[in-house]
């Protein structure tokens, strides 16, 4: 057996560790801004403000869905009902819904922008720029709340991308508002709507792809299948590994099942120790829940 003299500190991010406060603050701030943006958009006849308000509203809905998903994740699994894994998978569904909402928003934004492009209206560029400036501050602050978890959790990544995308769009609205104020180039308002679509699609593509793959139980992007196999085979006493299945339990936790063939000369206690070592090493491969079936010519048993 391999004796590990070094210590391992596994600080894996889990949904329960993600603070729901960031989502609550984001929902409150962005809802208030959506209302202000709609009012300003109607007063100034700005399609850029109105479409950006629709974009922000989609993010509010996405934040709300993610918040509900994290609440459900905290419900402990029970063998007494049909949800023995709990509700972890809801975080993946939330990420997928968020991405779909943004894609739908792209369609709405595109339609409205094209309509207004041919028939531009007189716009108050000054008010347009001031309102969008507030949007930069609100979206930037909200994005900051999700920065620490964006590389570890798909919904936090989605929220961060949405908020940063919104801040970028708001910056564009500020610039266009200033230009319109001094040039009366009203067509730029509609042109910005088309640019908004490109920003949304670019920021949403990876989120949509990752959430779809997780939904159909593909190997998670943060897991290297070949590395997992190699990790198991390198444990002393392992002759072979097969029937390996890896999937996402949630946006932060991955699971694995595998048949591991051990040297028949090993005692049962040695095999138990080897299984423990396998599970320990798999944590370095982002596998948080492993079910190993010990296989040899004389016996077969499952260890959870």
Image: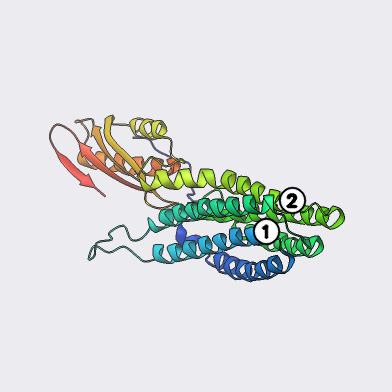
Q: Nearer the viewer, residue 113 or 275?
A: 113
The residue positioned 65% from the left and 62% from the top of the image is 50
Expressed as whole percent of the image width and height from the top left, the position of residue 21 reads 56, 68
Q: From the viewer's perspective, is 23 left or right of 248?
A: right
Above or below residue 107? Residue 297 is: above
Q: From the viewer's perspective, is 129 left or right of 163?
A: right
Q: Residue furthest front?
A: 119
Q: Is residue 157 visible?
A: no
- Colour convention: rainbow
The residue positioned 68% from the left and 50% from the top of the image is 117
Q: Residue furthest right?
A: 182
Mark 1 highlights which residue? 47
Q: Residue furthest top?
A: 239
Expressed as whole percent of the image width and height from the top left, the position of residue 77 reads 31, 62
Expressed as whole percent of the image width and height from the top left, the position of residue 135 reads 70, 62
Chain-order first, disc 2 or disc 1: 1
Q: State the CA–CA distance, disc 2 to disc 1.
A: 10 Å
Q: Is residue 126 visible?
A: yes
Q: How many marks?
A: 2
Label 2: which secondary element: helix
Q: Quadrant of the N terminus?
A: top left
Mark 2 highlights which residue? 187
């Amino acid at each position: 057996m391999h004796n590990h003299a070094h210590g391992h500190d596994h600080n894996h991010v889990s949904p329960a560790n993600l603070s729901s406060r960031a989502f609550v603050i984001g929902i409150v701030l962005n809802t208030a801004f959506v209302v202000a943006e709609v009012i300003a958009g109607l007063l100034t006849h700005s399609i850029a403000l109105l479409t950006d308000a629709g974009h922000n509203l989609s993010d509010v809905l996405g934040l709300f869905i993610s918040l509900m998903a994290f609440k459900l994740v905290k419900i402990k699994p029970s063998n007494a009902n049909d949800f023995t894994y709990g509700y972890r998978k809801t975080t993946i569904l939330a990420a997928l819904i968020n991405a779909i909402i943004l894609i739908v928003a792209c369609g709405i934004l595109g339609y409205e922008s094209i309509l207004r492009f041919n028939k531009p209206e007189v716009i108050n560029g000054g008010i347009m720029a001031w309102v969008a400036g507030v949007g930069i501050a609100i979206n930037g602050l909200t994005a900051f709340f999700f920065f620490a978890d964006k590389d570890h959790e798909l919904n936090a990544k989605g929220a961060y991308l949405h908020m940063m995308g919104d801040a970028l769009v708001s910056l564009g609205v500020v610039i266009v508002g200033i230009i319109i104020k001094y040039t009366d180039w009203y067509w730029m308002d509609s042109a910005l709507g088309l640019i908004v679509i490109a920003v949304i699609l670019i920021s949403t593509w990876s989120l949509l792809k990752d959430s779809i793959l997780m939904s159909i139980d593909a190997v998670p992007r943060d897991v290297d299948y070949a590395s997992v196999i190699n990790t198991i085979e390198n444990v002393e006493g392992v002759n072979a590994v097969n029937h390996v299945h890896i999937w996402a339990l949630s946006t932060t936790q991955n699971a694995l099942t595998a048949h591991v063939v051990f040297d028949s000369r090993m005692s049962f206690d040695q095999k138990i120790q080897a299984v423990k070592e396998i599970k320990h090493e798999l944590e370095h491969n982002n596998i948080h829940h492993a079910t190993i079936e010990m296989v040899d010519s004389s016996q077969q048993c499952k260890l959870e």
